Image (cartoon, grey):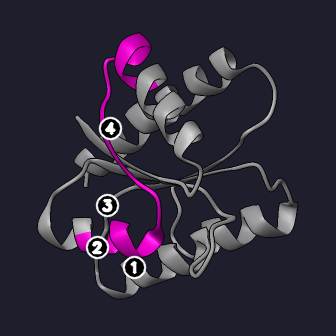
Amino acid sequence: MKVLLVDDDPLFLELSKTFLEVFHDITSDTVNSAREALQRLEKYSYDVVVSDYDMPLMDGITFLKTIRDKRINTPFILFTGVGRDELMHQAIENGANSFIEKIGDPKAQYSELSKRIWQAVSNSASF
């Protein structure tokens, strides 16, 4: 399993990568912008994309719309500190598989993220 983590915060990327790899056996690549993520998705195959929402130049919803417009159907999880119902609805309407808020205990957060990653991969394999 290979996940692409997209976030403009380098410390959060490193924390995410460590938690997923060490505690949940999920390998990941990290990029700090949606533009860089688009370049990676054109060259490499990933099982899931996990993206922040609040990023400069291209936010997570615009990034999601862009990859769906390019017919990239990789499962997509919006993992964000911006928790609004409207944002969650936008994510789902534009093809996100899941939406998780970055709040609370990191161990619980990453356990939930790991569960959602495995669910997204399992669901996409059944199509």
Find disc 2 in the rendering and name its residue. Answer: 72
Is residue 115 depicted above or below 122 in this figure?
Answer: above
Mark 2 Cα within 10 Å, few/some/many (few <14, many 20+)? some
Structural distance between the alpha carbons of marks 4 and 1: 19 Å
Residue 7: image x %, image y %?
54, 54
Is residue 9 depicted above or below 18 in this figure?
Answer: below
Q: Are marks 2 and 3 in contact (CB under 8 Å)?
A: yes
Structural distance between the alpha carbons of marks 4 and 3: 12 Å
- Residue drawn 26% across the image and 73% down it: 39
- Is 113 inside the magenta-drawn segment? no
The residue under label 1 is which amino acid type? Arg
The residue under label 2 is which amino acid type? Ile
**Residue 126 visible in rendering:** no
Which numbered mark, 4 or 3, is in the foreground of this view? 3
Is residue 40 depicted above or below 45 in this figure?
Answer: below
Structural distance between the alpha carbons of marks 4 and 2: 17 Å
**Residue 34 visible in rendering:** yes
Query: For the residue labelled by badge 1, is the local secondary structure a helix, a strand or a loop?
Result: helix
Structural distance between the alpha carbons of marks 2 and 3: 6 Å
Find disc 4 in the rendering and name its residue. Answer: 122
